[in-house]
Image (tube, rainbow, N blue to C red):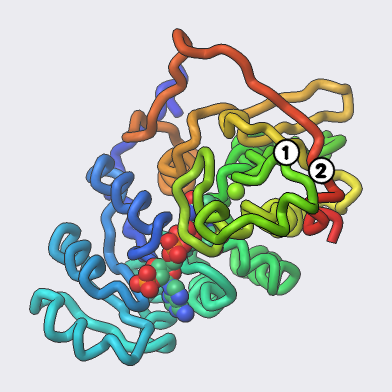
Amino acid sequence: MTASGHSHHSSAPRRIALVGATGTIGVNCLDVAAHLPGRVKVAGISGHSNIDRLTEQARRFQPDWVAVSDPDRLEEAKAKIPSGIRILAGGNALARAVSAPDIDMVVCAIVGAAGLESTWAALEAGKDIALANKETLVVGGSLVTSLAKQRGAKLLPVDSEHSALFQLLQEPGALGRVERLVLTGSGGPFRGKSQRDLLAVTIEQALNHPTWKMGPKITIDSATLMNKALEVIEARWLFDMGPEKLGVIIHPESVVHSFVEFVDGSVVAQASPPDMRLPIQYALTYPDRVPGPTRRLRWDELKSWNFEQPDRQAFPALDL
Ligand code: NDP
Ligand code: MG
């Protein structure tokens, strides 16, 4: 920062490895990267089974390497990915690639516990992590956060609620002044339904999320509120807060992404339209902020933000 408060940017672009490039978060991340060529260079990408999308991404972003984790798709990848781009097969090769000295940051956007391996390797090498893969913290929160600390690697949250909390807690010492962290959740497509109503819902209805366009696993988890339960665990590890300091409130508009209540009673919130490109970008450019592709809040269309308590009877996952 200069004395006038403007942030300077003169360094070379951050070189990122994007694991899980072919998923919803991966695609959003590449869109951010495309808008910020001076800030972000996509050095490597990984995909599992969607070789056509991976090939198209390789053509467009010209990374040094492309990793394919599904062994049954390797031949297809070799046939389709443009020559001149290195093709890596299997978990070990990916683990080595994300740990290489030319990588500044690893964006972890694989879904499920399969995301742990590459995240772990990157942390071992001391890489900063932009973490979408919450399952990494759900299955290994204690080990993962202590490894990050040990290696001096930053864990930058991409999950929108956790990015909101992280943004709200930037003041030095802020964590020590927290009374409660309150995560918002849309309530999903079945908000307002009773336990009985839920017996009759279909997968198609569960996949039809009202505010977010996400991959199928997290969308189903959002319909049961299991996603919010996983996010409470994620917050527990990211911010080292006991469960008594973690709350959940339903906010159907998905514009307020979380609240921090400080010990003096002041409550601060982070708000922006439901668009994952903003939390992704914040992690990529952290601690800086720059104009990007994200939809902005339309103040002229703003009417009301609603909040309600989660129905813990119909959605027992939260108490679990
Ligand atoms: P998607 O299902 O859209 O994408 C998953 C990605 O992981 C794809 O690139 C897929 O490859 C890859 N993948 C799947 N299985 C494996 C495997 N066994 N080994 C290696 N790679 C694999 O998921 P999302 O993008 O929605 O979610 C990604 C992560 O981000 C999740 O942990 C989710 O909870 C979290 N998240 C997502 C949000 C969202 O808005 N989508 C919001 C907040 C968090 P391929 O498609 O080529 O098979
Ligand atoms: Mg979330």
Q: Residue at x 25, y 69 (%)?
A: 54
Q: Viewer-proximal residue, 234 or 98?
A: 234
Question: In this figure, which residue is indicated by the disc labeled 2?
Answer: 311
Q: Secondary structure at mark 2?
A: loop
Relative image position of residue 232 (x, y in whole percent)? 75, 53
Q: Viewer-proximal residue, 207 or 113?
A: 207
Q: Is residue 254 above or below residue 220?
A: above
> Marks 2 and 1, how far apart in space?
8 Å
Q: Residue at x 21, y 71 (%)?
A: 52
Amino acid found under the numbered disc labelled 2 = Asp
Amino acid found under the numbered disc labelled 1 = Gly
The answer to whether any part of residue 119 appears in the image is yes
Relative image position of residue 69 (x, y in whole percent)? 37, 83
Q: Is residue 205 above or below residue 248?
A: below
Relative image position of residue 297 (x, y in whole percent)? 46, 21
Q: Viewer-proximal residue, 271 or 40?
A: 271
- Disc 1 within 8 angstroms of ligand 2 (CB): no
Q: In the rendered image, which quarter contains the N terminus?
A: top left
Q: Residue at x 27, y 64 (%)?
A: 43
Q: Viewer-proximal residue, 151 or 25?
A: 25
Q: Secondary structure at mark 1?
A: loop
Check residue 192 in the rendering and tell me which mark sits there, or answer none.
1
* Residue furthest to the right: 244
Q: In the rendered image, which quarter contains the C terminus?
A: bottom right
Relative image position of residue 34 (x, y in whole percent)? 24, 46
Q: Is residue 162 left or right of residue 317?
A: left
The answer to whether any part of residue 235 appears in the image is no
